[in-house]
Amino acid sequence: MKKSIALLIAAGITLGLASGLVMAQEKPAAPPAQNRIPKNVKAAMEEGLAARVSAKADIPFKITENVCMPVPGQTASYIYLLVDVKNADMGYAVPPTPQVVDPTAPPAAAKLLARTYVFVQYYKIPEGKSPSLEKEIYIPAAFQVDQEGYDPEAVEWYSFGYILPAGKYVAAVALSSPDFQKFGIQYYEFSLPTPQEISANLITSPILILKDYAQTEQPETSAELHKGLLAWSIARITPNLERTIPAASPLDLFFFVYGAKPNATGRFDLQIEFEVNQTDGKPAIKFAPGEFKSPLVSLPLEMKQTLQVTTGDKVETKQQDLPAGTYVLVAKISDKVSGLKGESKVEFTVK
């Protein structure tokens, strides 16, 4: 992961979000008719909303966490929900045989196909009031896997994203079979940074530890269900959700600083001090302050400790890899333009 990623993608993501990422559009598809959530699914979603208790669990799944990223020039944010689903519950089956088969083509590996729908109702939670429906969407999806090596008990993670205004929300999420007769429902609360919050302090999106990063030519223009990645406009981000790295490996970071202000020429000027502490607060690594010219931060941090070794009257300095264990990365952020400050943390493990 190269330090220049932020510079390479910032312009592309800004352009993509500004020009194409209109998540208020439902993706055209087959039923449900008129882009609405089926009545039986919607009724079950609404039934459990007040108590946040699922009224239907034919298809079990779990919403594990959320990630928010910015929309340039807006106070809205792009919110992802991450979902764990067992393969067997996705409904993988042998797909229908194609009507036309090319006899000259080499035999293809046997596949399994899963088709599903995700239905989402986003409710805004005003202070002291009942939730009010902000938006509802549906997402048709299909996934293929090789029959060989398929494990019905394996749990995979999926994600979908949507743009919402700042504020506090509860999402009612249903995962449904294509005939809408079998489905499961989960509820999940989250908050998106408000202008009031970022006017007083710098706030970051969740600090992601990256496994992989790629770009596409065109931004995503409607909500889609993705397997094992986050789709942010032209970016395809594969986070390390286990937050575990091998010894001697760098910690690849990716996050956005909300509340950073450009100067009169439109340039950002952030200073970030990173440090790694043990879980009891004892320092393990302290990095020199770094200068960042974009609120989108992506860089690798080498997990090397500098130690002083005293032998008699002689003091020597040596480096060693950060030992195995659980640690907390702390990012202390200062905006030289506005004077605002902020701090963000993420726990990780070295094995």
Image (spheres, grey):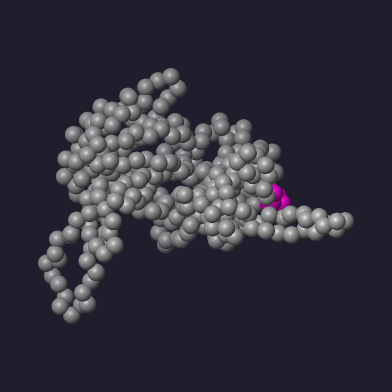
341 shown above or below 7? above
Seen from the viewer's position, the closer of residues 152 and 224 is 152
Task: Write the start and end of the magenta stretch as one range.
Answer: 286-291
Q: Nearer the viewer, residue 90 or 81?
A: 90
Q: Nearer the viewer, residue 57 or 3?
A: 57
Residue 290 forms part of the magenta stretch: yes
Which residue sits at x=80%, y=59%?
316
Residue at 72%, 51% in the rendered image = 288
Residue 6 seen? no
Could you tell me if residue 202 is visible in this image? yes
- Residue 108: % across, % down: 23, 71
> In the image, residue 335 lies at what x, y percent?
67, 43
Farthest residue toward the left?
A: 99
Q: Measuring 50% from the left and 38% from the top, which residue is drawn there?
A: 75
Would you say residue 281 sits in the magenta stretch? no
Q: Where on the picture, by quarter, is residue 180?
A: top left
Furthest residue to the right? 313
Q: Quadrant of the C terminus?
A: bottom right
- Left or right relative to 91: residue 24: right
Left or right, residue 240 beside residue 46: right
Residue 121's place in the image compared with 316, above or below, is: above
Rendered image quadrant of residue 202: top right
Residue 222, image x and y in percent?
A: 34, 49
Which percent across, then down, holds residue 216?
42, 61
Seen at 55% across and 44% down, the residue is 347
Image quarter of the N terminus: bottom right
Indicate whether 31 appears above or below 102. above
